[in-house]
Amino acid sequence: MTLYRATVVDTPDDPFTGGALRSEEDAGLLVVGGAVVARGSFDGVRAEHPGEEVVDLRGGVLLPGFVDTHVHYPQVRAVGGLGMPLLEWLERCALPEEARLAEPAYARGVAADFLAGLVGAGTTSAMVFGAHFAPAVDELFTAADASGLRITSGLVVSDRVLRGDLLTTPGRAVEDSLALAARWHGTDRLRYAVTPRFSLSCTDEMLAACAAVLADVPGAWFTSHVNENRAEIAEVEALFGGEHYVGTYDRHGLLGERSVLAHDVHPRDEELGVLAARGASVAHCPTSNASLGSGLFPLRRHVEAGVHVALGSDVGGGTGFPLLKEGLQAYFAQALLGDDGYALAPAHLLHLATSAGATALGLREEVGDLGVGQRFDAVLVRPRAGTTLDVGLRHASGPDDAVAKVFALGTPADLEQVWVDGERVGA
Ligand SMILES: [Zn+2]
C-alpha cells in the first residue's frame, strides 16, 4: 500500500463532449495492489490512512501513462528518414530495415530498443505494429512481457507489392498468426492484433485470411493503415476496382470496436460514416503526417462524424516516441487548418494522449485517468530545476496552463518516473 502525494492532472471526462481537465494541486492517491483505491486532498486521504508509506512526488505533475495507438516496432532504428513521401520512404527507409528482422537475434536487439523508447517517453500502453516474421514478433512479445507494458501486437502480413522477403501466403499467415496468438493473446498484459500492413499490399484472399484469424481468436484486435497519402489511396482504389479504402477492410468484416486504423488523413464522408457505424478508432499520427507530407488531419470531420480518435507516434514515419510531441503537433496541424481545424485546448491534448487512447484500445475501464478504481499507470513530469519547463510550471497560471507547458516543452528527459499497475517500469 502506497500513498502518493502529487499534483495530479487527468481527463476523466471527454473534452470533445464538454469534459474539463481535472486537477488537484496537493492530491493524495492511495494505491493498493496496483489500483487507485482512494483519491482526494493529501491531508484528507492521509487522515484516513495515517499508517501508509508516503511517496512525495511534489515539484512536478503526475499524469496518466500515455497510450500510443500506432507505433512500429521494426522501425525504431529508422526514425529520422526525412525528405520522402510515404511510398518512397517505405521503399528506401522503412522496409529495408524491416527485412533485417528476419534474423531473430537482430530482432531481439530492436525489441529492446523499441520498448526502451516507449517507456522512456512515458508510454504505458500501446498498439504496436509487429514485424513480418513470426520469430521477430515472438521476440517482441517476450521482451514486452518482461517490460511490464500493456502491449497489443501481431504478425504483419502482406502478399503483394512489397519486396519479396516481406511477403507470405494467406495460408501461412493464418498458421503463423494463430500460433502467435495461442502463445501470447491474454498472457499478462499482452494481446494479439491481426495486422495486414495495408490493403495496398494485401489481396482479398489475404484480407479474408485476416478475418479468419480474427474469428478464431476471441477478443483479438485488428489494426492497419488507411487513407494516409493520396498516391497510396489512388493505388488502393485501382487495385480494388474503385472501392474506397475503408471498404476494402469493411467488406471482410474486419472493422469493429476492436479495430484501430492509422492516419485517415484523406477520408471520404462515406468512409467516416462506416468507421463511426462500426465503432472503429482512428490513430492520428501528426508528426508522421507532417514529416511525410501526407497532409493535415481533418479532426473536425472525424469528431462531427462520431469517429473516435486517439494519438499515435507512428515511429518510424513519426519523429519519435513522445506523445507530448504528437499532442503539440496535433495542435499545430489544427491551427494551420484555420476555420477547418479543431481548436485544441490543453485538456484535448491530454485526453488524446491518455484517456482517448485507452478507449481506442478497449482499456478505458482499467486505465486512462487516475481516478478511484483505475490501475495506477502513471508518469511523473518533474523537470530539472532551471529548465524552461521547470520555470514554466512554477509560473503556470493554473492546471490548463501547466498542461499546455508540459506539451509545449516536455521531453523524455523531464519524465522522472513511470508506473504500470503500481510498479515502476523502465527504471
Ligand atoms: Zn504506420
Image (tube, rainbow, N blue to C red):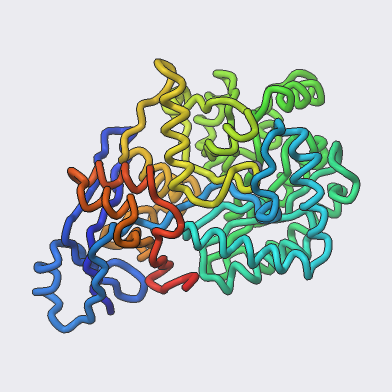
- Residue 414 vertical position relative to residue 306 in the rendered view, above or below: below
Choose top left, top right, bottom left or bottom right for residue 133: bottom right
In the figure, is residue 195 to the left or right of 205? left
The residue closer to the viewer here, 194 or 128, is: 128
Residue at x-position 56% and y-position 27% = 274
In the figure, is residue 116 to the left or right of 408? right
Q: Is residue 227 visible?
A: yes
Quadrant for ligand 1 reads top right
Residue at x-position 58% and y-position 43% = 259
Q: Residue furthest front?
A: 386
Q: Position of residue 97 (x, y in %)?
A: 78, 52
The residue closer to the viewer here, 299 or 216, is: 299
Residue at x-position 46% and y-position 35% = 330
Q: Position of residue 312 (x, y in %)?
A: 53, 44
Q: Is residue 304 visible?
A: no
Choose top left, top right, bottom left or bottom right for residue 82: top right
Residue at x-position 30% and y-position 46% = 403
Q: Position of residue 264 (x, y in %)?
A: 58, 30
Counting labels gives 0
Q: Position of residue 49 (x, y in %)?
A: 15, 77
In the figure, is residue 144 to the left or right of 310? right
Choose top left, top right, bottom left or bottom right for residue 327: top left
* Quadrant placement of the N terminus: bottom left
- Residue 307 vertical position relative to residue 92 in the rendered view, above or below: above
- Residue 201 vertical position relative to residue 315 in the rendered view, above or below: above
Q: Residue furthest right?
A: 164
Q: Residue furthest top?
A: 339
